[in-house]
Amino acid sequence: MQESLDALLRARYPDIFSVNSSAGQRIFRFECGDGWFPLIDGTCELIQHDIETNGTQQFLAVQVKEKFGGLRFYYRQGCDYAAAAVDLVESLSPYVCEICGALGKTVSLFGWMQTRCPAHESTTVYEGAPLTLENNVLLVPPMGELLGAVLALFALDGQAAARWLTEPAPALAHTIPLTLVGTLGGQRQILTLIAQLEHGVIP
């Protein structure tokens, strides 16, 4: 991940990515492509909000990396809610291009399993163009509210929530919900549908 995004995550969530420099530990680094920034950011937003709202145990990241084409979030402490949020984002990552964040799938690239969209099927994380930053703010809508809503809908079952986000939804004209998260309007559509389902309304 490019240094500016790396630094942005550490600045936004210092309690999650805290480092005791006096103990000689290295600076926390994210060992994955830029395309997973929204997933990591949304998960951290959700977890930190739960900690501050409900007083749950502080979640501490140990390592965030790509492994076998998916995102891996290793951590210490935390609660069941944090575990569910991590399960959700790890389950979503094999459907999100590690380079650009578009809908993707896991492919074999130079003998390694990687998640790519059709446009980046042969691109390594070192070759992909960095995601656009404007005044140090990534031009992608935050995902925390959406991730929290879908987790609540599925009673903290992260894998079930991920399946729902990655399968065509009849109420969204058979669009895959995950393809809509890149815009505020798309996220509003998904959140409206979730609210309807929670109240027993069949769109």
Image (spheres, rainbow, N blue to C red):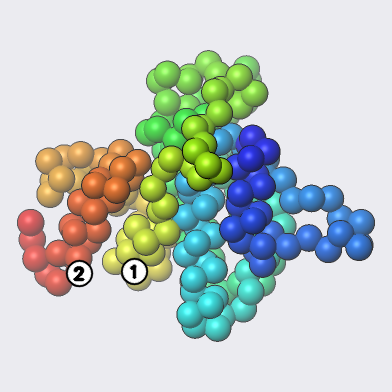
- The answer to whether 81 is drawn above or below residue 150 in the figure is below
Along the viewing direction, whichever of 42 and 123 lies nearer the viewer? 42
Along the viewing direction, whichever of 163 and 65 lies nearer the viewer? 65
**Residue at point 48%, 19% (across, down):** 121
Q: Could one spot residue 166 in this view of the protein?
A: no
Left or right of 98, for residue 166: left
**Type of the residue with mark 2:** Glu
Quadrant in which residue 176 is drawn: top left
Label 1: few (<14), some (14–19) or many (≥20) C-alpha neighbours in 10 Å: some
Tag shown at residue 152:
1
Q: Could one spot residue 152 in this view of the protein?
A: yes
Residue 149: x and y in percent read 32, 64
**Type of the residue with mark 1:** Ala
- Which quadrant, please, contains the C terminus? bottom left
Inter-mark Cα distance, 2 to 1: 9 Å
Residue beneath disc 2: 198
Residue 202: x and y in percent read 8, 61
- The answer to whether 163 is drawn above or below residue 22 in the figure is above
Residue 5: x and y in percent read 60, 42
